[in-house]
Amino acid sequence: MNPPDEIHLSALRLTTHVGVPEVERATSQVLEADIVIRVAERFEAMNDEIAATTDYAVVATRLQALAAERPRKLIETLAAEMAACLLAEFKAVDVTIELRKRILPDTEHVAVRLVRGI
């Protein structure tokens, strides 16, 4: 059996307020997310119809809006909310999300990664 087909969004920029200290949440930050959406229907069965697939432009806009909705202390919280949104609102059978934040000195970024499925 073949694995599910995947849609990837790489380095999606999300503007949000996140951080444990209140002073850190006071200023917006740009996080980056790599998102893998696994879909139930094989690509060749979609017959070149946008309605048959997951519209990645709509996904990007929805996740950006979700990130901007409210402040959070943890990037873990935002990653979990993003996964729940993709599973509930889009044609995903499972998702993988890596969410990155540039915050610590001497590191490029910190990241969390999760895999969720229906």
Image: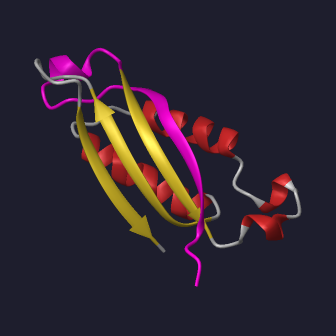
Please give the name of the residue rendered at 22% of the width and 40% of the height, measured from the top-left corner: 74
Q: Is residue 16 magenta?
A: yes
Please give the name of the residue rendered at 25% of the width and 23% of the height, measured from the top-left corner: 102
Please give the name of the residue rendered at 35% of the width and 54% of the height, measured from the top-left corner: 80
Q: Position of residue 105 (x, y in %)?
A: 11, 18
Q: Which residues are magenta?
A: 1-29
Quarter where residue 59 is shown: top right
Q: Position of residue 86 (x, y in %)?
A: 53, 56
Residue furthest out toward the bottom: 1
Is 39 drawn above or below residue 19 in the view shown?
A: below
Q: Nearer the viewer, residue 101 or 66?
A: 101
Q: Is residue 21 magenta?
A: yes
Q: Position of residue 85 (x, y in %)?
A: 51, 55
Quarter where residue 46 is shown: bottom right
Question: How has the structure been colored for display?
Answer: secondary structure
Q: Nearer the viewer, residue 19 or 55?
A: 55
Quarter where residue 24 is shown: top left
Residue furthest out toward the front: 1
Please give the name of the residue rendered at 53% of the width and 63% of the height, measured from the top-left corner: 87
Is 33 drawn above or below residue 116 in the view shown?
A: above
On the picture, is 10 further left or further right than 71? Answer: right
On the picture, is 79 further left or further right than 117? Answer: left
- Count of number-bearing discs: 0
Q: Nearer the viewer, residue 3 or 99?
A: 3
Q: Quadrant of the N terminus?
A: bottom right
Q: Position of residue 60 (x, y in %)?
A: 59, 38
On the picture, is 53 further left or further right than 12? Answer: right
